[in-house]
Image: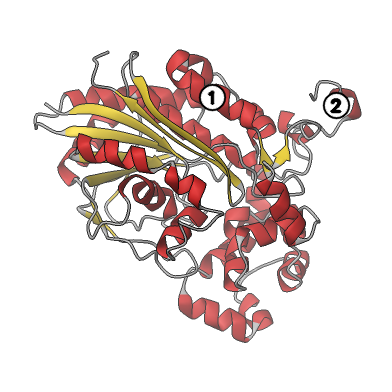
Amino acid sequence: MAKIVAGIACSHVPAIGVAMDKGQTATAYWEPLFKGYEPARDWLAKLAPDVAIIVYNDHANAFSLEIIPTFLIGVADRFPIADEGFGPRPVPVVQGHSELAWHLAESLILDEFDMTIANEMPVDHGLTVPLSVTCGQPAAWPFKVIPLCVNVVQYPPPTGARCFKLGQAIARAIEKFPQELRVVIYGTGGMSHQLQGERAGLINRQFDTAFLDNLTKDPLSLTRISHTEYMREAGSEGVEMVMWHVMRGALGENASEVYRHYHVPASNTAAALMILDNRSGA
Amino acid sequence: MTQPHDYDSIPGTYVYDAERGRIGYPLNMFCMSLNKAENRRAFRENEAAYLDRFTLTAEQRRTVLERDWLGMLKVGGNIYYTIKIAFCDGLTFQDVAGMMSGVPKETYAKMMLAGGRSADGNRYTDAVDAAKDK
């Protein structure tokens, strides 16, 4: 039987990927951020999962405004790296887990989550930066990946509560998958940041800290945060944090925090990385 | 006329909602086209001629040609799309963020290094509501 062994919350700032790709991680600007990633990489390498479900948003790369899926699952065997306007990142092609992904698609739809299914899609920094952050720069990614996209670009994104319930449905589906697989689930994006308008550059450490604390203390209270509250308190792009609820909803109640790193700034953003161990049972 | 939203009171913020999605579609799809290297080349060669391929309004066209980043948001631009013009120009997200917030690049970078723009005092446009803002 497949099992979700851990949840990872990770910001997906494009500049973090650029810093790694250009070998700038040891500069005075980036060093404090990247130093904090190392213990998480060690922990994940020891955990050695088979598959990662990465919940992220596409940034006008695989999809445009032509069609806007609220929830989408990638079921391919491989996902090429997107050209986001400055050439594709020099990172390995992402290998999918088609069988598990199709199982998830079927189970979720029958469980009343009407997923869009993608047989072909490139993946952008929303997915590859969290992989780079947690795996470093290997010649091939150490596990297979199922991309799960959430629309957060066109208002309104799905609510935090809906995202949490999707996570719960993912957990139910994983439990029913007959192969012995150890699965991790990533919730990406955030934390506080605003990339647009006169208010660009907004950061709210207090909001972010409370959010991180409540991922273990009281995750359900976080699902009641409205979109307007995210935007007002954590910046217009801070609303991406709804994606973390998919991850949290997929874990048991007793999932425990094993690692936390928070750093300001990564370009315009408050960057966080948190690991939640889900092996203790529900 | 559009319905008022509770997020309208957030200062300096252009939520990409139904109304902006409706008017901004051609502008953003032009930006999307810049994901292709050959289109970036064609745009750089002759911006006005390249823009003729899309059905932009005169004001949308102006904001693109003048690189009026804030203006683009006001006529339906979405930052994840308009940033593609900036990438085409060799600018970074932080360069554009500085320009949108009306400060020199160095001032903006310094603000970010010092922990970013505080939420305090930046939550509400309205002076009455501003009392709540601390």
Of tags 2 and 1, the one toward the viewer is: 1
State whether residue B47 is above or below residue A246.
Answer: below
Element on which disc 2 rests: helix
Q: Position of residue A259 (x, y in %)?
A: 39, 29
Height in image: A12 above or below A162? below
Q: Which residue is mark 2?
A: B130
Label 2 chain ID? B
Q: Residue at x 18, y 32 (%)?
A: A182
Q: Which residue is mark 1?
A: A211
Q: CA distance from mark 2 to mark 1?
A: 24 Å
Give amino acid for label 1.
Phe
Quarter holding residue A10: top left
Q: Position of residue A55 (x, y in %)?
A: 38, 39
On-image quarter of the N terminus of chain B: top right
Is the residue A59 above or below the residue A272 in the image?
Answer: below
Q: Dot 2: within a 10 Å radius of its alpha carbon, few (fewer than 14), some, or many (20 or more) residues?
A: some
Question: Looking at the picture, which amino acid does disc 2 mark?
Answer: Ala
Q: Specify whether A173 is left or right of A34.
A: left
Q: Quadrant of the C terminus of chain B?
A: top right
Q: In x, y percent, where is residue A92?
A: 28, 60
How is this picture coloured?
secondary structure
* Residue A157 in sight: no
Q: Nearest the camera: A58 or B59?
A: A58
SS at badge 1: helix
- The picture places residue A275, in percent across and down from the top left corner, at 36, 30
Residue reaching furthest to the right: B127
- What chain is tagged by disc 1? A
User: Counting other residues with Cα less than 10 Å from the Cα at mark 1, is it few (<14), some (14-19), or many (20 or more)?
Assistant: some
